[in-house]
Image: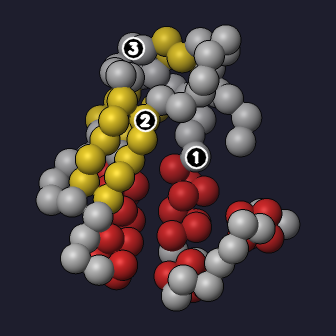
Amino acid sequence: FTPSPGRITAFHPPGGPGIRVDSAAFTEYLVSPHYDSLIAKLIAHGSDRQEGLARMNRALDLFVIEGIQTLIPLHKKIINHPDFIEGQFDTSFVSRLNS
């Protein structure tokens, strides 16, 4: 969860039904080490949990951010974990997942 400052060399956010990306980042954007490292917020929704998770999974697959490290692989690991899919998680879920 450490910030990854540097220049974004490619930024191609996903889109489509049920997908929203809030960001001010773009290709060649310089992520400063002096500010909040949140460069984009990806939001997915569907008619039910299964559809929302499917849309999020696809959006994470399509989201291209190059030049800096991101948490996209961690988010994919989380939303594809059987316990998360079944709604069986708590505030220590991510800590257990990374141990």
Query: Which is nearer the N-term, disc 3 or disc 2?
Result: 3
Residue bearing mark 2: 40
In this view, the mark in front (1 or 2): 2
Residue 87 x %, y %: 54, 83
- Give the side of residue 60 with respect to residue 87, left or right: left
Instruction: Answer with the quarter of the image where residue 48 lies.
Output: bottom left
> Residue 52 bears which disc, if any?
none
In this view, the mark in front (3 or 2): 2
Query: Which is nearer the N-term, disc 3 or disc 1?
Result: 3
Task: Give neighbour class at mark 3: few <14, some 14-19, many 20+ (Cα, 10 Å).
Answer: some
Whole-angstrom CA distance, mark 1 to mark 2, is: 11 Å
Q: Is residue 58 visible?
A: no
Which residue is situated farthest in the left direction here? 17
What amino acid type should be assigned to the residue bearing mark 1?
Answer: Leu
What amino acid type should be assigned to the residue bearing mark 3?
Answer: Glu
Give the answer, above or below, for where 63 lies relative to 10. Answer: below
Q: Are marks 3 and 2 in contact (CB under 8 Å)?
A: no
Which quadrant holds the C terminus? bottom right
Residue bearing mark 3: 28
Give the answer, above or below, for where 8 lies relative to 64. Answer: above
Residue bearing mark 1: 71
Whole-angstrom CA distance, mark 3 to mark 1, is: 19 Å
Dot 2: element: strand
Q: Are marks 3 and 1 in contact (CB under 8 Å)?
A: no
